[in-house]
Image (cartoon, helix red, strand yellow):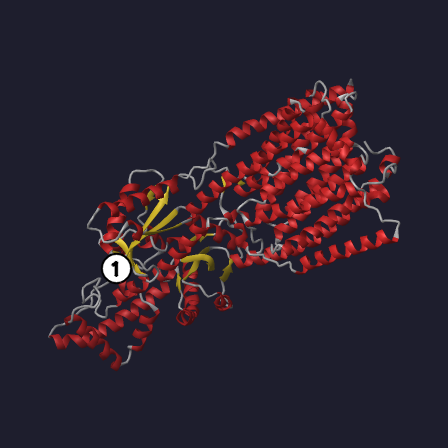
Amino acid sequence: MTGHRLWRGAALLWLVFVLGVAVHQWRFWQDPKALDANIMSLLPVDEQAPEVDLATRRLAEQASRQILVMLGTPRWDDTQRAAAAWRQALAGQGALVESQALNAGAFAETIAFYRPWRDRLLTPAQRTQLEAAQTGARTEALAQGALAALYQPAVQARLSDWLADPLGLWSQWWTARAAETRARPRDGWLWLSTEGREWVVLAYDITGSAFALDGSTARGDALQAAQAAARAALRADPTVAAGAEDLEILRAGVPLHAEAAATQANREINTIGWGSLAAVLLLVWLAFRSPRPIVLVALSLGIGCAVALSVTAWVFGSVHLLTLIFGASLVGVAEDYGIHYYSSRQSQPQVVPQALMRRLLPGLLLALTTSVLAYLALGLAPFPGLRQMALFSSVGLAAAMLTTVCWFPLLDRGTVRPNRFAQAVGASLGRWPRLAWPARPRQAYRVWIACLLLAALGLTGLLRLQVNDDVRQLQSSPPELMQSQIRLARLLGVASPAQFYLVQGANVEQVLQREEALKARLEPLTRRHGFGYSALSDWLPSLSRQRSDAALTAAVETRVLATIGPALGESLRRPAFANEPLTLERWLDGPGSAAARTLWLGELRGVQATSSGSASVVLLRGLHDTTVLPALAAAAEGLEGVRWVDKAGDISQLLGRYRLAMGLLLLLAHAAVFAALAWRFGRQAWRGWLPTALASVATLALLGLLGQPLQLFNMLALLLLLGVGVDYGIFLLEHPNDGSAWLAVSLGATSTWLAFGLLGLSSTPALRAFGLTLMFGLAIVGLLAPCLRPPAGAPTDAARGGAAP
């Protein structure tokens, strides 16, 4: 009675915990920030330079709310008509709001903001020109040029009167700034003419959360409706020269990728999760033909997934989409405990449920331990995404196990009768061949030939195995969206956050001065290789640079006006400019910061930065030649507070290092598992370990033969294969001739294989590699494990000692 009360007490405590999880689940799904689709949150934090990680994340956050759209036709009038219809279609709907950051009308406001400080805004070429004008001959040449500009029609529009800018420096400075985007104001639009098309550029800010897991595509639907309206406008007007088919539309932006990821995740969770659940419940029905096992096994799976989700959210603050997709495959693993219980219940109906569970508990705990250790091994890599997956899966398995152990003996009433399907599967163990070395020489010769052929095939596959540690394997956006993003960025010359310089200093002035030192090194590279850069100091020079440039401009322009004055018969006086310098605070509050505000990171709070204070980033534009990257890295060498960041390259290298580290860990894990099996099963331990070891080698060979690259996620899958696959050997060593144990192993292996086989259908390359590896490995383990069980009549060491349940 005491044991029964303890059991009921444990069941009651578990019920209280599950009810608490249910309350958290209701709140979790009401929180729009509970789920995360940002690919950056999967990547590791740079423990040596946390400020780099913070800068990368801030850049990603700043870009996460804007969408860029380009509409182009061969004729400007037709493009305007299509753009007007597009704008009207999106007016009033809530998903997208047109941004003012790239509004053509904001250009005049920006010019007016900067005008008081015109005298201290110079390009490097202008500065060199003015410094050389200190000689009389150069001054005379500048005076002649200024006089010609006064009387001749201007080649380009002047942005101020001639006396305020006699040398035309202001217009030239704005031309240099305009090079940061190739779009220009025209007729109230942002316009670009290239590739035989006249383009309109539109920018939108999103409203609400960047993504929703309900499968909705509000932003995509809004853009599709606008696209239909633009094409309809071209079809409806007979005077339009371009047809609707001539309209080309490009779109780019993190929100579009997030929405695509959410839609894909919704689809894959349904496919993997519900597909796995349907397969598990079908197998349970075929084996036990009773609603009670179906309900209880489904209950254990549901509680396992719910507890895993709540604990992961509690530890990490949010749950990533890839964790949910990966966690959906947990259904195919967590059902093993319930199936094993009901298989034994079916074969031993006379045993009381609690007594039966006591017999099964040692084997179930050993199987849980190996699986949890395998999942936790995923978390050894410094990737938050992998650690989420490891925690989610480990907690989910433990919760499913606790549900089975605490509740099944109390809720399970009645009997589970044998049926033809269960009997046929259980009886098949006796017909399964046991591998043994043949006694006859001729048969041994044939076995040698077969082993050599298999070894040669495996060696061929291993030699063909290629590695791929590219971080882009984490990205799974639709190809058409990626192509549109790449082309739009190329046409507009948009700066990429993939590589950048992080500039740090004790204060704003030091940051700007260090930027200016970096730009001096970059100028020769940009001229030689044809790319550009975007820096905060282009729009906000340091105070020392402002003072020196203002003095230089005043000296040269005063001398030029003094030279021109007698020729005009006038006394020309240069107008005064602002006495106060342009400061960061004034710049941030004004419209002049719209184009470059994202380059300023401010104070790096929340990290132990190697250089405390403020920081900015210098982004690169139009960089397509990766051979320049070493030269760009060298440009930062020796500059205090300046760091070259190639996040994609760094993460790819890290993936490679951890692939090697996980390979070594895999070997150590195999040794540890073999030691644990030897402690329990003695000299028969190799029979439980060898199927998984052979399956691991065979899986690598198959990947090589199929041309699949080897990456970190294959190694992590092999670690999980060790934890899951060895369970089958454990169950068959515990019960080498028990048909019910074989029924449980067969059902569990089949459902697990289906779950990870469905994971192999994921469009995310990393998850697909994970699923394929386990699909191959689990199939091979399932075929080999019964072949290597002990001979009939030979009990295991565990059984001799009475330890086997």
User: Which quarter of the image is occupied by the C terminus?
Assistant: top right
Residue 683: x %, y % from top left: 86, 44
For badge 1, the amino acid type reads Pro
Q: Secondary structure at mark 1?
A: helix
Residue at 29% in and 78% down: 134
Query: Few, some or many C-alpha atoms within 10 Å of disc 1 (few <14, some 14-19, many ≥20)?
Result: some
User: Which quarter of the image is occupied by the N terminus?
Assistant: top right
User: Residue 574 appears in which quarter of the rendering?
Assistant: bottom left
Extreme residue toward the left, this view: 569
Can you see residue 507? no
Task: Check disc 1 and report the residue beneath it.
Answer: 116
Q: Is residue 171 found left or right of 152 in the rendered image?
A: right
Residue 267: x %, y % from top left: 50, 39
Residue 231: x %, y % from top left: 29, 46
Extreme residue toward the bottom, this view: 137
Compared to residue 634, the image places residue 688 above or below, namely above
Residue 507: x %, y % from top left: 44, 57
Q: Nearer the viewer, residue 248 or 3?
A: 248
User: Residue 649 appears in which quarter of the rendering?
Assistant: bottom right
